[in-house]
Amino acid sequence: MDEALQTKPRRFGDRKTSDVVICLKNREGIPKRFYSHSSVLINRSKYFANRLSHPSCSDCINIHCSEVNHDHHVNLLKLLYLPADSISDSLDSVKSALGILQVAVAFQCEEIARCCIQYLEAVPWEDKEEELILKAVSNLGPIAMPILARIQPVDLAATKNVFISAVRVATSISEPCPPFGNELKTSAQEQVEFMLGEDEDAPLVTADDEVKSVLRMGLLQIYSTFEKELSALLLEPDLVSDRAEEKILHSLSDLEWMFNILGKMDLMKDFVSNWAESSSNVLEVIEDKKLDSFMWGLKIKLIEVTAKVLEAVGYGNVILPTPIRISLLKTWLPYIRKMKPLLDSKGSEETGFPYKMSEDLCQSIEGAMVTLVLALPSNDQADILADWMGAEQVQYPDLSEAFEVWCFRTKSAKRRLVEGLDGAGNATVSL
């Protein structure tokens, strides 16, 4: 070839200076010719270097490719002509870079493959693209490690640190940055819940002493905020405004979220104990005459959280001493008994009144209370049942099942006592 032509820069597809043709063939065998240069192919691809060094190699190299990766082959041939520092800048999408990478690995174009990997490792991926990348690079070996490092499992220590930091933000132990505010807190709560989500895989976080300590701190922080806002509620100048209710509802929602989290970490007892201890103070505020006609959303949310607590205690998920269980029942039973007909009445009077006790909620509370009553000493059962039947509203909750069981047990106990006394009186003494 003429020396003048050899010194000129090579251009892809330049038929005048081309000394080799790449012929891409699809499944039907229809060829598409691309005029290339052996010097470029040999310098940038070990595959083409081996092909062109073979004595029997002609000036036309046939390559079979599918319709799917045809464009990736063409793009690779074009990249062979670019300087190394321009390759990454020429890539314009994850899909294209991934396709070129696979072809570059097949044709042993190390420089181009490295640039594709740098591009894929640096740019953001969509969920669908991530699946494609995983599928494509899993068979590429060590060369793909920079990409796989981005999505490989994190060690337990790093995961725990992220979880603890998220809990601190979610519970306001660490105050969120002003530009993000509640958005960051909400996001942290969602991700904490996701990390503890039940699935087929092993949990991301284990409940060791450090994790439990931070969760307990978070619980105390949320409780403290809730109690402060509840105490200040009666001092609000405008109780009718939605703002006053929204503020306290937000804290109560945080508490409800915390209940769900602690249940997954074997710390539900901490929540239930705090709720039982603070119940009297909570109802002292919420039953103040100033709130008789307001805060219906807060009142129904309190009942919903209490229902979770009653279920946890009633069904034995949380074991509490008898005095605390009695106090929990005697505190909330009268309030719930009063609120149910009141909310029903409001719903009948006001069209679209949203604050009602759903059927599921009612059944949940009723079932939990029945089991709670039946797990108490007989005399305490009698006190609670007598109070329930002596009230004006006996319709809800329906404790008749507990009453029937109490009657049966009381009669059986009386019979056993009599039989025991008779047996003792008829006993003979033998020497």
Image: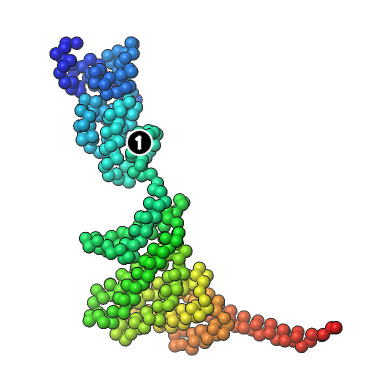
The image shows residue 47, relative to residue 245, as above or below, that is above
Across and down, in percent, residue 38 comes to: 25, 17
Position above or below: 425 against 362: below
From the top left corner, tell me how far across and down residue 219 is, in percent.
Answer: 38, 68
Where, by quadrant of the figure, is residue 422 drawn? bottom right
| Number of numbered discs | 1
The answer to which image quadrant residue 238 occupies is: bottom left
Residue at 34 percent of width and 68 percent of height: 254
Near-viewer residue (145 or 26): 145
The residue furthest right is 431
Q: Is residue 153 above or below residue 173?
A: above
Q: Is residue 340 visible?
A: no
Q: Residues within 10 Å of mark 1 (few under 14, many from 20)?
A: many
- Is residue 120 visible to us here? yes
Q: Is residue 97 left or right of residue 391?
A: left
The residue lying at 52 percent from left, 86 percent from top is 383
Q: Amino acid at mark 1?
A: Ala
Residue placed under numbered mark 1 in the picture: 144
Q: Residue at x 36, y 37 (%)?
A: 145
